[in-house]
Image (cartoon, rainbow, N blue to C red):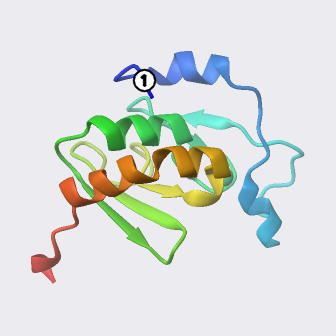
Amino acid sequence: MNRVAFISGEVLKEAQPPHKCPRRAEGAVFVQSEFDEWREMPNGDLTCSYCGSWETQQFLNWCETATEGTLEFVKGYKFYIRRDGVSNAGDGAIKFYTPHLTREEGNANQAMINKAMKRLAWDRDIE
Ligand SMILES: [Zn+2]
């Protein structure tokens, strides 16, 4: 699959309609609105207004192209992401929740994400 290396948050935000966060199905209701939106963070990342997850296409683009940063898959449904310039969730995306992947997106990108995890592995020697 060919993708542009970088899609700005503004372009992506305009291209996407409001969505309903898949994590709403887990029960807890944090935000009382019918639809959720992609918030543009100071660094251009888009994050889900309901769960804080990084927007899927931006996350996949980063996995495909990143040579620096760290990525760890934990609890079977979430990735934690560390990048220079993003010290907390107020700066940009720090996590990706896999419920935001459709089954098709998951199947199409699993090998690429696995490669990214090997390339950008969390530094376990710190602990
Ligand atoms: Zn969400």
Horizontal and vertical percent position of residue 48: 63, 46
The residue tagged 1 is 3
State the image quarter where residue 3 is shown: top left
Horizontal and vertical percent position of residue 90: 44, 47
Foreground residue, 85 or 18?
18
Would residue 103 be found to the left or right of residue 8 on screen?
right
Looking at this view, name the residue that lies furthest to the right. 34
Would residue 1 be found to the left or right of residue 34 on screen?
left
Q: Quadrant of the C terminus?
A: bottom left
Residue 5, placed above or below residue 127: above
Horizontal and vertical percent position of residue 34: 89, 45
Mark yes or no: residue 69 visible: yes
Query: Dot 1, crowdedness within 10 Å: few (<14), some or many (≥20)?
Result: few
Residue drawn where x is 44% and y is 40% of the image: 60
Mark yes or no: residue 28 visible: no
Would residue 123 be found to the left or right of residue 87 on screen?
left
Horizontal and vertical percent position of residue 78: 50, 65
Residue 46, placed above or below residue 68: above
Query: Which amino acid, mark 1?
Result: Arg
Residue drawn where x is 12% and y is 77% of the image: 126
Residue drawn where x is 77% and y is 71% of the image: 26
Find numbered disc 1 in the image and state the secondary structure of the residue it sits on: loop
Residue drawn where x is 66% and y is 52% of the image: 103
State the image quarter where residue 27 is shown: bottom right
Q: How many marks?
A: 1
